Image (spheres, rainbow, N blue to C red):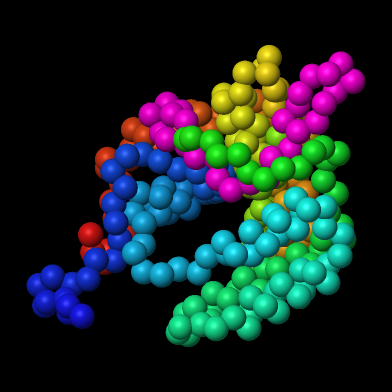
Amino acid sequence: MTQPSADKPFRTHVETETPQIDIRHLADYMAASRQSQRRVVQGCKYRRIARVIQHTEARTVIYNYINSGGSDPQKLLDRATFVREKLADDDFESEVNDHNADYIERFAASQITVVLPKAEISPRQDMAPIDINGLSVRFGHHLFLRRTTTTNKQRIGAVMLRYAKGETLDVDVAEWQTAGMFGFLRMVYEAEAAEPERKLCVVLDAYAGKTHLAPSNAVYRFNEMKAACADIAERWPAIKPPKNAVL
């Protein structure tokens, strides 16, 4: 293995030159203090190369459970046991497995209180990022929701998961995220074909088992998000890397 020289240490971060963010982090940005906003944007521009704990497997398990109409939390607990006991190549991978198992177990305990809107649930539909005032915005992982009205019109939405161990999702963050989901879908879908509906844009707090729907002021909030996108895009070139970062 090549070792870093004294004058050329290993890189710690990679710079993203094109201004970009996803709906989740844009919601975090909108709800944050000015100081925290800088950290959110800095984290989007300078991505860590070092391995970080991800909840990809837990989200996949829970999305599949919801999509299948799951009503037996024991299936989630069995899956959590499988994830926790998987063979790991090193301590870090074992820690990732433990975190994902914790996530699944917590949802198994809290899912009894989950009430999703009445709609047809289907797996995610890939959506290309859209440009919002110079900032490339991604939708992120989700389940797709669809219902047909009594007048045979299509209404659509999505479910996104949020989870923080030991923490209930802040309501303001959830409302920014659902407003962002609603606004994004309105920009992507033609109303004649399928119209996004506020009550079908859902953030599910997997820790608390609580669902958050897009608020009544979702259009106003999304307009605020669009203005923030312009600000982020304008400031992107001037955003400095984290202290001691090696690019």
The residue at the point 82 percent across, 26 percent down is 148
* Span colored in magenta: 130-156
In the rendered view, does 45 fall on the left or right side of 168? Answer: left
Instruction: From this view, report whether residue 70 is shown above or below residue 52.
Output: above
- Asked if residue 28 shows in the view, the reply is yes
The residue at the point 78 percent across, 53 percent down is 68
The residue at the point 70 percent across, 74 percent down is 80
Q: Position of residue 195 (x, y in %)?
A: 70, 22
In the rendered view, does 64 fall on the left or right side of 247? Answer: right
Q: Quadrant of residue 6?
A: bottom left
Q: Nearer the viewer, residue 233 or 98?
A: 98
**Quadrant showing the N terminus:** bottom left
The residue at the point 72 percent across, 43 percent down is 122
Q: Position of residue 60 (x, y in %)?
A: 64, 59
Q: Nearer the viewer, residue 91 or 154?
A: 154
Instruction: From this view, report whether residue 109 is shown above or below residue 122.
Output: below
Q: Position of residue 132 (x, y in %)?
A: 46, 28
Q: Is residue 16 magenta?
A: no
In the rendered view, does 1 fall on the left or right side of 147? Answer: left
Q: Position of residue 32 (x, y in %)?
A: 54, 48
Instruction: From this view, report whether residue 110 is shown above or below residue 36.
Output: below
- Asked if residue 210 shows in the view, the reply is no
Q: Quadrant of residue 109?
A: bottom right
The image shows a total of numbered marks equal to: 0
Q: Nearer the viewer, residue 157 or 46?
A: 157
Instruction: From this view, report whether residue 223 is shown above or below residue 3.
Output: above
Q: Is residue 140 magenta?
A: yes
**Quadrant showing the C terminus:** bottom left
Q: Nearer the viewer, residue 199 or 230?
A: 199
